Amino acid sequence: YILHQENVNERPAILNQEKMDDQTSHVAKVDVGTPPSAFQRWESAEVYFHGFADLPTTREEEIDSPEFTFLGNQWCLWVYPGGDEDSDDGMVAVYLCSMTDEHPVIDYFFTVRDLAGKEVAHFASKGDGSNSNFAKRSTIMAALVEGTLAIEVRMRHMDQSNTSAIPFIPKNPLCNNILRKFMDEESADVVFEVSSGSERGEKTRRRAKTSSAATFHAHRFILQDGAPTLAELCKPGGGDLPTVPITDVKPDIFRHMLFYLYGGKVSDEELKANAKDLIDAADKFGIESLKLEAEACYVKSTTLTTDNMLDNLLYADSKNCALLKEAVMDFIVENRDDIIGKVSFDNIPGSMMTDLLTAMARGTDEDDGTSDTSNYNNMR
C-alpha cells in the first residue's frame, strides 16, 4: 500500500514535539531459530493525542502529530476528531501519511485500547487506505486515559517478491461530490430556519432572531427526489435566497435528515438514540428509506411490555409503520393470556381491533395445530 505523500512545509504539527522514546512502546524481539531471509518484522509506536476531548470536532478539521521515524521514513498521523468528508456521522477518521519523497510500500494497522488494555478500535490496511470510519467518537471518548488518546501504530515492509502491480482505478466521485455540497452556503439556493419551538404569530415571524433557531443551507434539486414534501416548501424567491421556517423538528434531527439526503449515513448510535424523532421527520417530509431504517432500528432496540404495547401500536398506526405494527401484534399474540381481560383496548380504532382479533385467533389456531404456520406468516 503506497501511502499518500505530503509536503512537510505545508502541514505544521499541531501537537507539541516529543521524543521518539516517549512515543514508542519498547517491546523485546526474541528469535527462536533463524529468521527466513524474507521475514519482515513489525515495528510499533504509540502516538498520544493529549486533551482529545477538547480538540475541535468540525468535519474535515485535522489534528497532526509530530513527525516520527519508522522503517527509514518520516511519518505523521492525522486524526479528524469530527470525521473527514467521507466519514459517517459520529465517526473519527485516522490517517498515516508519508512526509518524504519516498514511496514506501507497507502493511500497517492502528489500535486503540482502554485503560484495562482491551482493544476497542482497530484498523488494518487493505490496500485502499479507507479508514474514514476508524471508530465511533463515543467509543474513543470512553477509552481515553487521563484525557489522552493513545493510538498504537504498527507497520512493516510488504513482501513484493510475489506480487504484481495493482492498477489504481478511482471510484465514481459523484456521491462524494454531492456529499461535499452538504451545508455549502456558496452554492445553496434555499435556507431552512429550524426551531423545535411551537411559537406562533409574532413570535414565529421573529424566530430567525432567536438563539434557538438553526440555519441549514440546501439545494432544491437534491430535495426534489429524496424529500418531495420538503422540496415543495422551497418556493423560488426571485433574486433573494428563500428562507423556509421549520418549527416542529429539532435542529439536530433536521441535520441528520439533511445529511442523509446528501448521501451521508446516520450512525447506528444516533439512529438508536433518535429513532422516533427520525421516523416523525422522515414521515413528515416523505423520506421513505430513512423512515424504514429508523423504524427497523426502533423495533430492534425497543423492549415491548404490556405497559407500552398500546402506545406503540397506536404510534405505528398513525405513522403507517408496518414493521412496528407487526412486532406489537406478535407480542400481543404471544402474551395474550397475560393481556386479555387485564388491558383495556377502548382507544384502539375499530379497523385495528379487527386486525388484532384476527391475529389472536390465528395464534390460537397455531397453538392447537389447526393452522399451517407458513400460511399464517404469509397472510399477516
Image (cartoon, grey):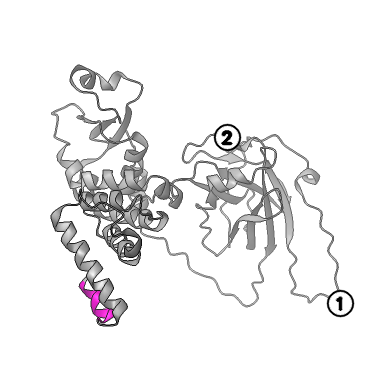
Q: Tell me where residue 334 appears, x and y as whole percent.
A: 34, 66
- Residue visible at 64% across and 49% down in the picture: 100
Give the number of the disc on residue 33.
1
| Amino acid type of the residue that numbered disc 1 sits on in the rendered structure | Gly
Question: Which image quarter: residue 192?
Answer: top left
Number of marks present in the image shown = 2
Q: Main secondary structure of the magenta part?
A: helix
Q: Secondary structure at mark 1?
A: loop
Q: Which residues are magenta?
A: 371-379
Q: Secondary structure at mark 2?
A: loop
The residue labelled by disc 2 is 55
Q: Is residue 269 visible?
A: yes
Question: Which image quarter: residue 284?
Answer: top left
- Give the quadrant of the C terminus: bottom left
Q: Tell me where residue 33 appears, x and y as whole percent.
A: 86, 77
Residue 291, above or below 218? below
Residue 35, above or below 222? below
Q: Is residue 72 visible?
A: no
Q: Tell me where residue 340 appears, x and y as whole percent.
A: 29, 60
Circles 1 and 2: CB distance less than 8 Å? no
Taking the view exactly as shown, the residue that stands out farthest to the front is 341
- Residue visible at 36% across and 53% down in the picture: 298
Q: Mark 1 or mark 2, which is nearer to you?
A: 2
Q: Is residue 104 left or right of residue 305?
A: right
Give the number of the disc on residue 260.
none
Residue situated in front as seen by the camera: 62 or 1: 62
